[in-house]
Image (cartoon, rainbow, N blue to C red):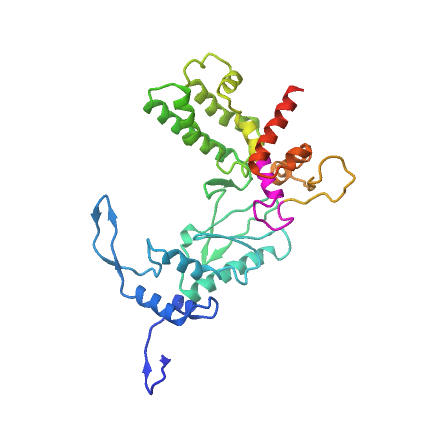
Amino acid sequence: MIPSDNNYNVCIHYSPSMLKLRSNLYSLDSNIVDWIRQWLSDRQQRVVVNGVYSAQGLVTSGVPQGSVLGPVLFNIFISDIAEGINGKVCLFADDTKICNRVDVPGGISQMTNDLGKLKKWSELWQWSFNVDKCKIMHLGRKNPRAEYRIFDTVLTSTSEERDLGVIISEDLRVSSQCNRAAGNSSRMLGCVGRGISSRKREVLMPLYRALARPHLEYCVQYWRLYLQKDIDILERVQRRATKMVYGLKEKSYQERLNDLNMYSLEKRRDRGDMIATFKYVKGIHKVEEGSIFKRKQNSKTRGHSLRLEGQRFKSNIRKHYFTERVVDTWNSLAVEVVEAKTVIEFKQAWDRHKAILNKR
């Protein structure tokens, strides 16, 4: 019951989501909130598939589909989900991830408490989680692999999970992602071979670069290969693509690459690492200072002034992480390469630098 200015009361129903909009968290005008509430009340919607319309149905989600207002409301409704949680929280669309270190005293109880706070948030705002899709991944050899619950349901343990198109495994190896990328790229290359009769390089190579190679290089800075067997799996796809070009089948792989003015995938990954590092160091990628790389403070060392400092690590896998594997290569670059003003200038300077090294 909400009292009015007159001598009677007007009964208006506000869902928890509407109460969140009406709160002082977002500074929304009351007229805007009332308009949103009226627009969502008793609203019907239908969908069309292959030109056939469905019957009208009442919208009960509170988040209108196919409207600009939908993602705006969704972001508002879940923006406070991480409040009070002690662990690191990662949010992307409707995916919520909580990370806690559990091999220290109190680590397991902290994870349990964070899950309990998610439950309280869900009950408060009446936004239920799909518990069947909630999973737990245990990382690290010293992980006690405790049992966790949410809504009195034991969370299922998983050894692999796909996140934003990349397969993450509990042992942090990349073989599964490598096999998946090679399979998708190979199937796409097969479609090109069956659907295109021409074998001219000006026809096949643009199709390979546009349709097949992106599968091999999607987010590769994260899942960079370091085992030779995985490197060969990806390189095999490009070998097959270059053999499809008329007149090059009998040549060696390196001769085919030189003829087509292409790099091997391994060299492209090295080049991509340096381009990404350049963007971080130069501030093109907006990140907090020192969160990715730490600059060397010793000015007496040889080389350029943008040298990076490597971190110490115990795990053999850690040295292949992006932030570790690029340090030595970046520090060895010539001054004219790292002092490029734009990304295009850096690419050109890098290519000249590698060409000089190859001639030595």
Assess whether residue 355 is covered by the magenta stretch: no
Residue lying at 64% horizontally and 19% vertically, measured from the top left: 359
Assess whether residue 290 is covered by the magenta stretch: yes
Residue lying at 53% horizontally and 62% vertically, measured from the top left: 83
Residue 111 vertical placement versus 293 (above, below) = below
The residue range painted magenta reads 274-292
Residue 158 vertical placement versus 213 (above, below) = below
- Find residue 14 and report its image quarter: bottom left
Quadrant housing the C terminus: top right
Give the left or right position of residue 351, taking residue 262 as reference. right
Tally of numbered discs: 0
Query: Residue 173: where, in percent of width, then height?
Result: 55, 36
Question: Residue lying furthest top in this view?
Answer: 250
Residue 318 seen from this side = yes
Residue 16 vertical placement versus 174 (above, below) = below
Question: Residue lying furthest right in this view?
Answer: 300
Query: Residue 167: where, in percent of width, then height?
Result: 48, 40
Query: Residue 102: where, in percent of width, then height?
Result: 60, 52
Residue lying at 58% horizontally and 49% vertically, measured from the top left: 287
Residue 15 seen from this side = no
Residue 116 vertical placement versus 295 (above, below) = below
Give the left or right position of residue 180, taking residue 322 as reference. left
Quadrant housing the N terminus: bottom left
Give the left or right position of residue 122, taking residue 278 as reference. left
Residue lying at 60% horizontally and 55% vertically, measured from the top left: 107
Query: Residue 204: where, in percent of width, then height?
Result: 40, 23
